[in-house]
Amino acid sequence: MEMKPMMLFKDGKRKALTLSYDDGTIHDRRFVKILNAYGIKCTFNLNSGIFGVEEKKMSNGVFTDFTRIEEREVKELYSGHEVASHTLTHPSLTEISTGMGTSEVLKDRENLERIVGEKVTGFAYPYGTFNEIVEDMLANCGIVYARTVRSTEKFEFPQDYLEWDPTCHHESPRFLEITEEFLKDESYEAKLFYLWGHSYEFAQKDSWQMIEDFCKKMKEQEEEIWFATNMEVMEYEKAFRELMVSSDGKVIHNPAETDLWYKLGNKVCCIAAGQRQQL
Ligand SMILES: [Zn+2]
């Protein structure tokens, strides 16, 4: 019987966890400390045109501080995580012209790349709004993935990375249940838990302990779970899809620049970047 190599993540782990948090408010400072304490990786979607802007207002019946972090703290604060674009000033991209949208994305990328000194090609849709025209515009601006706000409550990979639906928001009524499902999952295939939200929600609902408990639970299963940024997950999964298997199923070739792990039956194997292997 012919067996297909089944994807595993870095170090042969079967599960991956990635986080995506928007807007870059001052609450990211406390959030990053928690993430760093447990080694959890997050992608932070920032609006570089409104760094340092102060805003405090009533929201959901609670007086909330939405003040944005300062530009000068970006590089150090998010070090070890991914910085991605969320447009320059947070407009709904379906309500502005393609020309304005292009400028919102390109200027944001340019600013963020200058600040962090790395390429910024990830994206999250402000207000979660998009359509085909917006997707084409993003692709033309060099954006390679874009997160929506549609929860799947599943642990699958997207069909289209410009419509990357997360598993759930941390305020989902099923959040704890979904977390348990992920931790208890014993299926054969690789699974991805993609959590999203805003750190000001932890301040608003005083749910800091809840997110810390989540990180702690994930950390306890560290031997099984790869903690990665959105970009790391996407690059790994795309590289795996490029793995080439000979027609007789006996030789595989990894043309990617990254080592890949896979499972054949119950055997866990690794194929180094650029290598060929007998199955
Ligand atoms: Zn936002």
Image (cartoon, grey):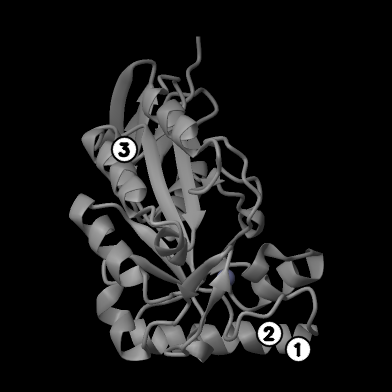
Query: Label 3: few (<14), some or many (≥20) within 10 Å?
Result: many
Q: Which circle marks residue 264 in the picture?
A: none
Q: Name the residue under label 2.
A: 102
**Rounded to the nearest whole Å, what is the CA distance between mark 2 and mark 1?**
5 Å
Residue at the outermost left position: 37
| Precedes in sequence: disc 1 or disc 3 | 1
Query: Label 1: few (<14), some or many (≥20) within 10 Å?
Result: few
- Snapshot quadrant of residue 65: bottom left
Does 84 sit left or right of 41 as displayed? right
Q: Mark 1 points at which residue?
A: 99
Identify which residue, 241 or 249, lies in the foreground: 241
Position above or below: 219 against 69: above
Does 58 sit left or right of 84 as displayed? right
Three-letter amino acid code at disc 3?
A: Ile
Identify which residue, 47 or 104, lies in the foreground: 47
Three-letter amino acid code at disc 1?
A: Gly
- Give me the residue at 35% from left, 39% from top: 9
**Rounded to the nearest whole Å, what is the CA distance between mark 1 and mark 3?**
41 Å
Which quadrant contains ligand 1? Answer: bottom right
Q: Name the residue under label 3.
A: 225
Q: Where in the figure is residue 199, as x and y percent of width and height?
A: 42, 64
